[in-house]
Image (cartoon, rainbow, N blue to C red):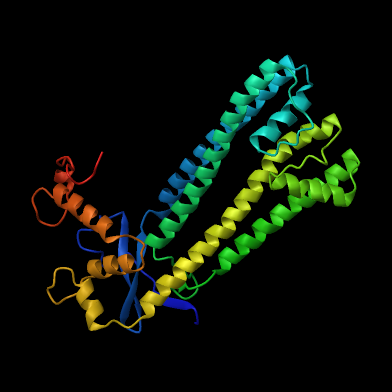
């Protein structure tokens, strides 16, 4: 099929890279096309437990961030409600405009101490925003790294073969369509709320919603009813995070597709004598699977040669008996001095 590399599906009986993995862990199996090795697919014998642990860790981290943000919003609203004499919905609405960096300006502190408090509160809010952005970017990078290490393959349950796509996969297209439709649905639902409950014109409400979700917050249109402001306090956080998440998904998928296309191009190229010599690190005239994998990753700029050298040096330091393999007796190893800088 055009744009795809087909590879043999792997079973647990395939030979793993010698000394690289242990039973019950992730094994590297050969992938072939017309009897030519073209890539590597990891076989995870404990895929479901591993995925469960990853999702548990991701869920707990997400809950922690949301709990901190919610506490930050509540405490800020409580202060402004007590010290400025605002109603709690208005105070919560104001703190939401701060933490989302929308800043309409229709509600603002009047007393000097409140302004001093706002200086501290705004600084903490900006820190929370950047922490959230950093977290989202980290998740994006981790997803891409997992795809790169795993050869970016998709097992097919119908024909027992694995496929490397050089463009967007069907699942990615479906995910992006679903994510975009979800955002549009929330956006249109928000417009309906502001039209029906705050008396905005449909065009004005759409304008207000888009200006808010982009965190521009011009302030020429703002909700006037207290109940709508209470809704807007929660909605503001949700819509801005959703837009950031949607943009992140598009960037994530586009980057992954570009990476797969580059890798597929490298894997399709015929091997020349010069290429063989570069991959043959020990210069023994034979190309091992490990040498092929490492050289291909370096060539595709997934890892650098420096990274490989550091990892190799760390392995040699841990390999106490020098047999080229690690066993349970070598779990206690010498400190990696002169290898990993503090």
Residue at figure coordinates x 52%, y 72% from the top left: 167
Report which quarter residue 253 is drawn in.
Answer: bottom right
Above or below: residue 106 compared with residue 79: below
Query: Hey, which quadrant is residue 301 in on the image?
Result: bottom left
User: Is 180 placed left or right of 151 in the picture?
Assistant: right
In terms of depth relative to the viewer, which is nearer, 37 or 119?
A: 119
Residue 132 percent location from the top left of the image: 55, 40
Farthest residue to the front: give it: 112
Q: Quadrant of the C terminus?
A: top left
Q: Position of residue 168 (x, y in %)?
A: 54, 69
Q: Is residue 93 above or below residue 238?
A: above
- Residue 153 image position (x, y, % from top left): 44, 67
Residue at 50%, 82% (x, y): give it. 2
Residue 96 visible in image: yes
Residue found at the far left of this picture? 321
What is the x, y in percent for residue 259? 45, 66
| Residue at 47 percent of width and 47 percent of height | 138
Give the quadrant of residue 120: top right
x 49%, y 46%: residue:
55
Relative placement, left or right, of 235 versus 276 is right
The answer to whether residue 14 of the structure is visible from this angle is: no
Left or right: 175 in relation to 57: right
Q: Is residue 119 above or below residue 29?
A: above
Question: How many circles with numbers are drawn on the protein?
Answer: 0
Q: Nearer the viewer, residue 89 or 323?
A: 89
């Amino acid at each position: 099929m055009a744009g795809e590399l087909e590879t043999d599906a792997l079973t647990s009986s395939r030979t793993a890279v010698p000394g690289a993995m242990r039973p019950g862990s992730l094994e590297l199996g050969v992938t072939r096309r017309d009897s030519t090795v073209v890539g590597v697919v990891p076989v995870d014998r404990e895929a479901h437990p591993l995925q469960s642990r990853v999702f548990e860790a991701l869920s707990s981290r997400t809950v922690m961030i949301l709990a901190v943000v919610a506490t930050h919003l509540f405490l800020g609203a409580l202060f402004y409600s007590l010290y400025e004499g605002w109603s709690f919905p208005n105070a919560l609405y104001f703190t939401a405009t701060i933490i989302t960096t929308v800043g309409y300006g229709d509600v603002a502190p009047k007393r000097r101490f409140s302004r001093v408090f706002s200086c501290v509160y705004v600084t903490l809010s900006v820190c929370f925003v950047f922490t959230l952005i950093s977290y989202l970017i980290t998740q994006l990078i981790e997803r891409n790294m997992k795809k790169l290490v795993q050869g970016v393959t998709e097992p097919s349950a119908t024909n027992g073969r694995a496929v490397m796509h050089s463009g967007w996969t069907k699942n990615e297209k479906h995910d992006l369509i679903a994510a975009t439709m979800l955002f549009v649905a929330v956006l249109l639902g928000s417009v309906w709320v502001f039209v029906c409950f705050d008396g905005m014109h449909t065009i004005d409400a759409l304008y207000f919603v888009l200006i808010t979700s982009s965190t521009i917050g011009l302030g020429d249109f703002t909700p006037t009813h207290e109940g709508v402001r209470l809704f807007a306090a929660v909605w503001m956080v949700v819509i801005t995070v959703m837009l950031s998440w949607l943009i992140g998904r598009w960037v994530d998928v586009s980057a992954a597709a570009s990476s797969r296309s580059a890798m597929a191009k490298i894997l399709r190229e015929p091997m020349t004598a010069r290429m063989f010599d570069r991959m043959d690190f020990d210069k023994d005239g034979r190309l091992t699977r490990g040498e092929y994998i490492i050289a291909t990753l370096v060539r595709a700029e997934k890892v650098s040669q420096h990274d490989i050298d550091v990892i190799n040096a760390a392995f040699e330091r841990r390999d106490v008996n020098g047999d080229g393999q690690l066993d349970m007796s070598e779990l206690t190893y010498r400190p990696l001095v002169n290898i990993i800088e503090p």
